């Protein structure tokens, strides 16, 4: 298992959920939600720098059959922009795309089970989805010994 902080992004049209891992890659925790807009990429780059993240894991939406549709194309484009912006601050940070099927559904269910209702749940579901993406990536790396997903 590689050591160092990783951050995960759940990229949506309106918001980006952010989660981070501990330096040992054991546990994913929520960090924040970034509103999409003019300075969203700068905020991601600043967070990666502040947390000294060596890797950014981005959820890639796939269909049930594993294919990629228009949403995946948009995420790939945004992921490339994130990579380019982060590399300006830290040339050692890599970006990986991982399958995010069912992460938002899983996050919604988790929050509902914990008693989060309506607007409170909507306010943190993006962060929770980022936690699910990152925890899955960490667990997969621990099980296989290989970095999760594909590098960008």
Image: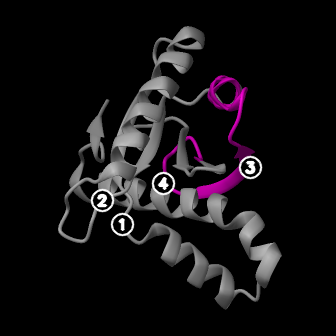
**Can see residue 63?**
yes
Mark closer to the observer (3, 2): 2
Q: Earlier in the sequence, mark 3 or mark 2?
A: 3
Q: Which colour scheme is used?
A: one colour
* Magenta region includes residue 26: yes
139 and 56: which is toward the camera: 56
Which residue was labeled with disc 4? 134
**Numbered disc total:** 4
Q: Which residue is drawn at 71% across and 35% down?
A: 37
- The answer to whether the residues at label 1 and label 2 have Cβ atoms under 8 Å apart is yes
Local SS, label 4:
helix
Query: Vertically, is 7 above or below 55?
Result: below
Tell me where residue 127 appears, x and y as whole percent: 65, 58
Q: Which mark is residue 62?
A: 2
Q: In which quarter of the image is the N terminus?
A: top left
- The answer to whether the residues at label 3 and label 4 have Cβ atoms under 8 Å apart is no
48 and 85: which is toward the camera: 85
| Snapshot quadrant of residue 150 | top left
Q: Distance between the Cα atoms at labels 4 and 2?
A: 16 Å
């Amino acid at each position: 298992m590689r050591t160092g902080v990783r951050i995960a992004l759940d990229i949506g049209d309106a918001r980006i959920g952010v989660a981070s891992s501990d330096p040992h890659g054991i546990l994913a925790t929520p960090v924040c939600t970034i509103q999409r807009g003019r300075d969203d990429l700068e905020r991601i780059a600043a967070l990666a720098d502040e947390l000294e993240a060596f890797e950014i894991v981005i959820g890639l939406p796939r269909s049930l059959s594993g294919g990629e549709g228009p949403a995946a194309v948009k995420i790939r484009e945004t992921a490339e922009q994130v990579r380019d912006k982060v590399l300006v601050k830290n040339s050692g940070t890599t970006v990986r795309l991982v399958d995010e099927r069912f992460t938002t559904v899983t996050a919604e269910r988790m929050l509902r089970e914990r008693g989060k209702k309506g607007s409170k749940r909507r306010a943190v579901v993006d962060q929770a989805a980022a936690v699910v993406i990152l925890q899955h990536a960490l667990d997969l790396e621990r099980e296989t010994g290989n970095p999760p997903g594909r590098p960008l």
